Amino acid sequence: HHGRFTGAITLFRLALNRYGIELPKGQAGRALQHSFCCHFIQSGGNSPTLQKALEHSCLAMTMCYAHLALDHLRGAVKLGSSVLKAKL
């Protein structure tokens, strides 16, 4: 029922089993989707593109991931500042 992503979900479930990670029944697909969305936004992806990929009917559904871009940016700025201070 996952179409072209059948291989990805199968590998994800195998990894969950291998590392002893237990999720509620039926949640592996949701966890994989959430992980993808987080990484996509943190890597510079934008919300409208993610909305299309997830087939969300409205952007508001996708915007729950938007804060991750800001959090990721803040972390990078903080790290960069500390590196600069250490070099001075």
Image (tube, helix red, strand yellow):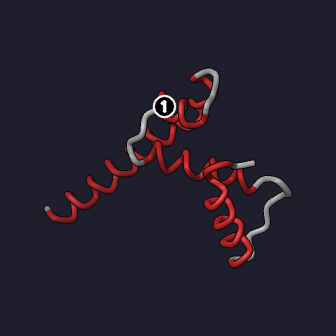
Q: Look at the picture and state if 75 lies above or below 52.
A: below
Closer to us: 64 or 2: 2
Q: Quadrant of the C terminus?
A: bottom left
Residue 86 x/y as whole percent:
21, 65
User: Image check: 82 left or right of 59?
Assistant: left
Q: Which residue is mark 1?
A: 47
Q: Amino acid at mark 1?
A: Ser
Q: Position of residue 19 (x, y in %)?
A: 69, 77
Residue at the far left in the pictured view: 88
Q: Looking at the image, is 53 positioned above or below residue 22?
A: above
On the image, the x and y values in percent for residue 51 come to: 55, 30
- Relative to residue 29, is residue 65 drawn left or right? left
Whether residue 61 sits left or right of residue 79 in the image: it is: right
Q: Residue at x 38, y 42 (%)?
A: 44
Are there few (<14), some (14-19), or many (20+) residues within 10 Å of tag 1?
many
Between 1 and 33, the residue placed more toward the observer is 1
The mark total stands at: 1
For this orientation, the residue located farthest to the right is 25
- Write the residue at 16% across / 64% down: 87
- Classify mark 1: helix, strand or loop: helix
Residue drawn at (26%, 53%) of the image: 81
* Whole-percent x, y for residue 84 in the image: 20, 58
Residue pictured at 86% horizontal, 57% vertical: 25
